[in-house]
Amino acid sequence: MSSPFGTRLKEFRDARGWSQERVGFELEVSKATVSKWETGRAEPGLASLAKIRRLYASDGLSLDYLIDDTYATAKPRGEMRRYVGEGTRESAKMAQNPDEMALLTRFRAASPVRRRSFLNLLSDSA
């Protein structure tokens, strides 16, 4: 049975399109360990939690959200909302659904040149 922690961890892994093996490599643990975390059969230690926080920091992941769903308790159930940046309008700070979360994750992972190209593409279609 998956835990809320495991479900949230998997959401962030899926948003990046990463395999459990890739996450394990980045966190210096095995694929089996990541699987156990996601299914609730094990929990990461403090050192692993710190690595998880650093790995997904650019995606807006906080340990508060991962561990006790701090953001989701303040939002309507079923809506995924995450802070995505500082200094922007409130409505622009949050991903409203999994598609926006995936888009933001891929945008942040792209090179500066690809980011500019993507923004140019969007401005041309407006």
Image: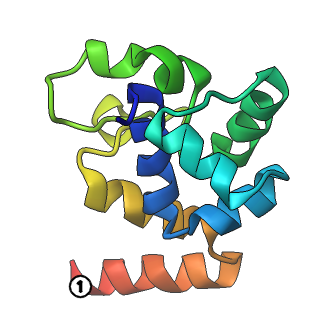
Q: Quadrant of the N terminus?
A: top left
> Is residue 60 visible from the viewing direction of this image?
no
Q: Residue at x 27, y 38 (%)?
A: 80
Q: Which residue is mark 1?
A: 125
Q: Residue at x 49, y 70 (%)?
A: 17
Classify 51 as above or below 118.
above
Residue 44 lies left or right of residue 102; in this view the side is right
> Is residue 78 visible from the viewing direction of this image?
yes
Classify 97 as above or below 42.
below
Instruction: Determine whether the residue tagged by mark 1 lies in a helix, strand or loop.
Output: helix
Q: Amino acid at mark 1?
A: Ser
Residue 2 lies left or right of residue 65; in this view the side is left
Q: Residue at x 15, y 25 (%)?
A: 77
Classify 107 as above or below 27.
below
Residue 20 lies left or right of residue 38; in this view the side is right
Q: How many marks?
A: 1
Point out residue 125 in the picture as x, y percentages from the top left corner: 23, 85
